[in-house]
Image: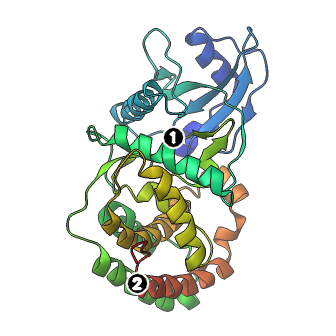
Amino acid sequence: MSNATFHFNALTPDLIWYALENIGIRAESGFLPLNSYENRVYQFTDEKNSRYVVKFYRPNRWTSEQILEEHQFTQELADAEIPAVSPVSIDGRTLHQYKGYWFTLFPSIGGRQFEVDNAEQLEWVGRFLGRIHQVAKTKQFKYRPEISLDEYLYQPVKYLENTQFIPLHIQKAFFSDLHLLINSIEKYWPENISSIRLHGDCHPGNILWREGPVFVDLDDARNGPAVQDIWMLLNGERHERLVQLDIILEGYQEFCDFNQSEMKLIEPLRGLRMVHYMAWLAKRWEDPAFPLAFPWFNDPKYWESQVLAFKEQIAALEEPPLSLIP
């Protein structure tokens, strides 16, 4: 069993309570687990009836410098009156340690689900993404990584080649089509990419809706192309994605210029995410939370379906990129 899994298994309610007490927070309610797999996240109420969320970081994933860069970025956004949830500062610190665990306290922010098919909400999200990127462009992350072929493609493929998950009867087809996908991604991946600080995982589940959008969970923040924070909001057929993209960018460009040439990165980025996601699940399989949440991952039918998904993504890469220019 991995060291990271061992540590999460030892994360008991008592340990959480004492960790919070160590920073002057006395939990009065139980700890409600929230939907997080990479880390462990719990909502609770303190003795003053204030609601908080405490996040315990997965051991050995980020360094303290990398975590603090995320915190500093969210604070910059909050200072610019952008609705991103930033950590609670206690005695001037946002990152705390107890019994070998790094953890952070956040205010508990309620909200309903962002409606991706609501044009008004989509334009509003676009405006705030433009404001986020305007702040993000002022400097780069120093310690956090960059979206790259190495981290998102080559390393994951190497890991998959050494796992026992892919059924023997499809290994040849699986890796043959995977390497064809790699070749296609390399073909359309430019040598030089303009990078800014990103949310990094800006899918609809990481946007709450209150009186407007609230951006949460910047755990995957890193440097990369601006379009990374846009493409995961697009769904449906090509004509539907074009309409959504037009709405997002109409709001976005009120505050930040968008380089239209980055449109050609949408399908390569989708391909990277596909491969990275498979390897991420394989790496985390020893964590008991993963087999419970993703039981289909260890089913041969899943891996058979991925062979078809590779072919479909290769076809998508061969199509002309989305464009709003007539």
In x, y percent, where is residue 233?
A: 56, 60
What residue appears at the point 43 percent right and 71 percent down from the top-left corner? 324
On the question of residue 103 being in view, the answer is yes
What residue appears at the point 53 percent right and 34 percent down from the top-left corner? 84
Q: Find residue 261 and report its image quarter.
A: bottom left
Tell me the CA gap for discs 1 and 2: 40 Å
Q: Which residue is mark 2?
A: 320
Q: Which residue is mark 1?
A: 58
Q: Is residue 97 left or right of residue 237?
A: left
Give the answer, above or below, for where 1 lies relative to 275.
above
> Foreground: 121 or 286?
121
On the question of residue 220 being in view, the answer is no
In the image, what residue type sits under mark 1?
Arg
Foreground: disc 1 or disc 2: 2
> Foreground: 51 or 61?
51
Q: Is residue 284 left or right of residue 301?
A: left
Instruction: Tell me the quadrant of the picture where the C terminus can be found.
Output: bottom left
Q: Find residue 294 and report its image quarter.
A: bottom right
Give the answer, above or below, for where 112 lies relative to 186.
above
The answer to which of marks 1 and 2 sits earlier in the sequence is: 1
